Image (spheres, rainbow, N blue to C red):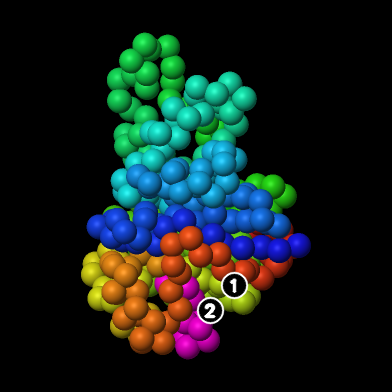
Amino acid sequence: MTWDLHFLGTGAAHAVELGSSAVVLERDGRPLLLVDCGPDTLDRYLAAYGEPPPALYVTHVHMDHVAGMERLFFRLWFDEALRGRTKVFVHAALLPWLQGRVADYPGALAEGGVNYWEAFRLVPCTRGFWHEGLWFDVFPTRHHVQGTSYGLALRGSFVFTGDTRPVPEALAIHGAAGELVAHDCGVVGNPSHTGVDDLEREYPADLRDRMALYHYGSVEDGETLVARGYRIARPGERLALPEPHAPRPTAG
């Protein structure tokens, strides 16, 4: 069995040439889970797989990570075979924010009679969730206001930080078993995002060696990170993953 992390896009919000940051977990080439859905994510996903995602995990509700959910709603609602089938996993603390961002406009359809979430299968979570026989851990990250962003981990296989400052306390738990770590990183950090100097200050070398950096600001910034000795994820790239460990939810 093969496992891959497919980077549909790798750019910061302004880096439109790199695509909105989003990944797909694949098992034997089949998409299991899309992580985030920015403005161009659905187009990239459909070009790769030919049909909408069976499941979506939302890390946080900035528009470069959820703006594509409106188009996904229309794609699902107007196909009775797909309507209500795509799972949306989201931390319970994000539900009010996600509702306000994508579902609260008065009338999902101009004709009325439709509730936004009827097009999906909404699955709130806190510690994590089960999907396709796998347990995915969910953990808080440091992006703007506390409690508004959550990373994702599949034990033994990968960690996806989402947009964040360094989170060494989280990766000490969720990145301690040889996982590939997809980490937010630009050339220069700021109060909401990690910079390369932050990586070197906060993380040991063996962990940095397992990182694939994304959410950088431009093609040129990506090459700067490479020149600094780091691996970057590139749009459309698939990175092979280790086999996940036996599924089990964490105790905490």
Q: Amino acid at mark 2?
A: Arg
Q: Is residue 81 magenta?
A: no
Front-lying residue, 116 or 22: 22
Which image quadrant is residue 179 in?
A: bottom right
Q: Amino acid at mark 1?
A: Glu
Image location of residue 68, percent across then percent down: 39, 41
- Quarter containing the N terminus: bottom right
Where disc 1 sits, the SS reads loop
Who's the residue at 56% across and 32% down the image?
121
- Quarter containing the C terminus: bottom right
Residue 165 showing in the rendered view: no
Are dots 2 and 1 in contact, CB under 8 Å?
yes
Is residue 211 placed above or below 204 in the rendered structure? above
Is residue 142 placed above or below 92 in the rendered structure? below
Who's the residue at 54% across and 60% down the image?
6
Q: Is residue 207 magenta?
A: yes
Q: Which residue is mark 2?
A: 210
Image location of residue 98, percent across then percent down: 37, 39
Q: Which residue is mark 1?
A: 179
Who's the residue at 51% across and 71% down the image?
181
Front-lying residue, 121 or 24: 24
Specify the segment rendered in magenta.
204-213
Within 10 Å of the Cα at label 2, are there few (<14), some (14-19), or many (20+) other Cα atoms? some
Side of 171 where 179 appears, left or right: right
Q: Of callouts 2 and 1, which one flags the residue occurring earlier in the amino acid sequence?
A: 1
Where disc 2 sits, the SS reads loop
Q: CA distance from mark 2 to mark 1?
A: 7 Å
Residue 10 showing in the rendered view: yes
Who's the residue at 32% across and 34% down the image?
100
